[in-house]
Amino acid sequence: MLDAVVVGAGPNGLTAAVELARRGFSVALFEAKGTVGGGARTEELTLPGFRHDPCSAAHPLAVSSPAFRGLPLERYGLEWLHPELPMAHPFTDGTAAVLSRSVGETAASFGPRDAGAYRRLVTPFLHRWDTLVRDFMSLPLTALPRDPVTLARFGLVGLPPSTWLARRFHDERARTLFAGLVAHVMAPLSGFATSAIGLVFALAAHTRGWPVARGGSQAISDALAGYLRELGGAVHTDYDVKRLDDLPPARAYVFDTSPTALARIAGFGDHYARYRYGPGVFKIDYALDGPVPWTAPEARRAGTVQIGADSAEIGAALRAASREKRAPDAPFLITVQPSVVDPTRAPDGKHVFWAYGHVPHGWDGDLTDAIERQLERFAPGFRDRVLARATAGPPELAARNANYIGGDIATGAVSGLQTLLRPKLSLFPYHTPHPAVFICSQATPPGPGVHGMPGHNAAKAVWRRLRQT
């Protein structure tokens, strides 16, 4: 009998399996797709030689993750590449605010009236980032805070809505960039703890950067799988699990799946019936004949570029997708251009690029024209660079990854108390109604992103049970 079976080979399932195997437990991992990866994959979606990331491409949380930093992933091929600027946010006048590794450069891009306010916001946390991110991404029941004072100070700043934090700034440049940071998790700007979301992304840029993985996000998943195999763990792909009886006998079962799928497979009925899924996204992967012709020079040097004319436009786009249940006329876009720093991603002189905008849950329309109209506002002539495009709305995203129900790439709404308390109100979020069954997906704390911390935290709960039995 195995000690643990893990279902789902996304970053969290892989991390949970590695953490258990590192501690001497026998582990087997089962994945429905033909390769491991989940939200960290790389595929030729458009033309031969153009390597795209179907989901996550830039990785501020991965490079800062306490789980990943504790693993020797570089031995298994993972190499981080840092663009000159982690992120840029261009404006219609041809200028841009930036999120730089340098706090000074970032503050200067906001203008003199807000430079000091930004420095005062981030400086107290910069030199405590490694400890803070570990405390922020762990539960008190899985690890006691190493710096409770800094964590409490961060909570005072981060728990209010981002609209409150934006009042620190006088001008629109800083407010707009910060609104875009919050929108990375598709949360309305007035939501609970949205200040923390924006602040985490900003601090990550200043301390560890927003890198891409050389060769694509698949390198993260392949490194985790390679380490797992070296530890003696088994990886089975093309293995679709419909019920618990499909799996070999084990002392514990760990699911990197949505709560909905777990309830169906394990027979938990309506245990997660109140769990809410959020808006979806419409994503386009592009093969380009050259770099994106951004008007703002800063955007040409950035790995990630946010697109939204001002904070009001960003807020309106989020409200349209989440509350008004319609596609926004001017969608807020997150775009990533990995080939500005990674030449392995496209043929010589060519580029890969992706963009996505928020749409209602389960929306089945086509946002291509709206997305490209937005891009043309900030990069005139963009359409002339397009060699091929691959589009994916909520139905296609859900077909690619069963965890993305309704196109929700966060595997659950990041709003209200569910921002922090997911998938249920519980002190033991990784536990389920069955004592031998656990959940470790991004539907559990600390939530969405490629960082492995739900898997890391869940593994602690699993090995504590295994040592008791």
Image: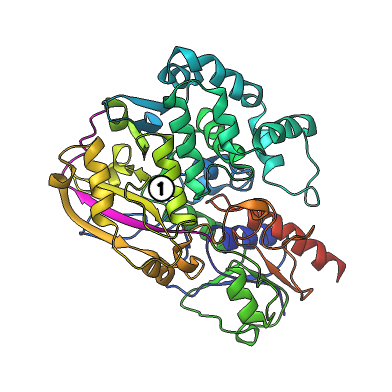
Q: Please identify the residue farthest to the bottom as the structure is shown.
A: 245
Residue furthest toward the front? 324
SS under mark 1: helix
Which residue is drawn at the image coordinates 54% and 37% (left, top)?
A: 198
Q: Is residue 407 magenta?
A: no
At x 72%, y 40%, the residue is 135
- Give the residue drawn at x 23%, y 30%: 295
- The residue segment tinted magenta is 278-296
Return the x and y of residue 307 as percentages of the image width and height: 35, 39
Q: Is residue 156 visible to the viewer in this orientation of the structure?
A: yes
Tell me the kind of residue under disc 1.
Answer: Ala
Q: Residue at x 46, y 47 (%)?
A: 78
Colour convention: rainbow
Give the image location of residue 456, x and y in percent: 67, 54
Q: Horizontal placement of 408 versus 127: left or right?
A: left
Q: Which image quarter is the N terminus in?
A: bottom right
For label 1, the residue is 317
The x, y position of residue 219, in whole percent, is 43, 53
> Taking 254 as reference, is 388 above or below it?
above
Work out whether residue 394 or residue 457 is closer to the camera in this orientation and state it: 394
321 relative to 1 in the view: left or right: left
The answer to which image quadrant residue 348 occupies is top left
Quadrant location, the C terminus = bottom right
